Amino acid sequence: MKESLLSILRNKKSDLCTYREATNRLSHLIAADAALLVKEKPISFSSPLLPCKGRALAENIVLIPVLRSGIALLSSFLYFFPDAAIGFLGIHRDEKTAKPILYYEKLPPLSSQNLIFLLDPMIATGGTAILSIEKILEKGASPQQIHLIGIIGSTLGVRQIATKYPKVHVHLTAIDKKLNAKKFIVPGLGDFGDRYFGPSV
Ligand code: URA
């Protein structure tokens, strides 16, 4: 099903509503996969009838959407992790150099107890992801606690992240081979943010 939803996103004929709905459904599938990554611990409690043993999540989840596209993934992750802490990173790409520029940072303190889902649908050059990871590490996390969750990545972007941070986990629905001159992923799906939120100037 992920592939058919991704094809709706890739299709230039998908209008805003179709695109947004397909993204939301795909996000649910991605978040459900991510939920399976969380470690559980044994617990004891009582049912209305008897004491019993069960399991509870053993890690404190932190969700960090990269503004603005990462917001599209947030509500699906909150469905599975309603008590997650949420941090924000605002990063845009310089139009000329395609280099990432941090314009907003609001992250919670992080410790070894956290499992961090860094949400950014498109991993083009890897520059935004690498800057995001640096900011998260500055707050006290280790690379292996970070799961970068995207929809499409480029071969180059994924390689750059793996070279710099081999212990960061990267989860994508598709990896496209190329970037164009403007560092957009091709075939990709165009500008994710404009297609999900509506065109911007
Ligand atoms: N961001 C997008 O929205 N699309 C790309 O192809 C690359 C980065």
Image: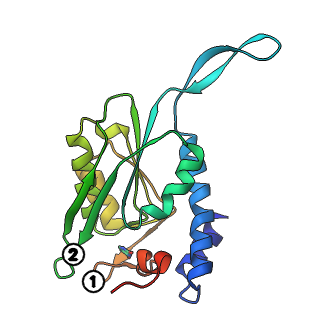
Query: Where residue 128 sits in the image (x, y, percent)?
Result: 27, 62
Position of 116 with respect to 58 (left or right) is left
The residue that disc 2 covers is 98
- Which disc is residue 48 wearing? none
Quarter occupied by residue 142: top left
If the image is split into quadrants, where does the C terminus sit? bottom left
Residue depicted at 53% across the width and 79% down the height:
10
- Residue 200, image x and y in percent? 37, 84
- Residue lying farthest to the bottom in this orientation: 13
The mark nearer the N terminus, 2 or 1, is 2
> Residue 164: percent from the left, percent from the top?
22, 51
Going by the numbered disc 2, the residue's amino acid type is Ala
**Residue 83 relative to residue 184: left or right:** right
Residue at image location 36% in from the left, 37% down from the top: 145
In the displayed structure, would residue 201 be above or below residue 21? below
> Can you identify the residue that label 1 sits on?
182
Above or below: residue 107 compared with residue 183: above
x%, y% of residue 23? 56, 68
| Quadrant of the rendered image containing residue 36 | top right
Q: Residues within 10 Å of mark 1 (few under 14, many from 20)?
A: few
Q: Nearer the viewer, residue 152 or 113?
A: 113
The reply to whether callout 2 and callout 1 are in contact (CB within 8 Å) is yes
Quarter of the image with the N terminus in it? bottom right
Q: Of 90 and 27, which appears nearest the observer?
A: 90
In the displayed image of the protein, which residue is found farthest to the right? 49
Under circle 1, the secondary element is loop
Q: Quadrant of residue 46?
A: top right
Mark 1 vs ligand 1: CB under 8 Å?
A: no
**Residue located at (28% from left, 62% from top):** 90
Q: Secondary structure at mark 2?
A: loop
* Relative depth, front residue between 104 and 93: 104
Give the image quadrant in which the ligand numbered 1 is located: bottom left
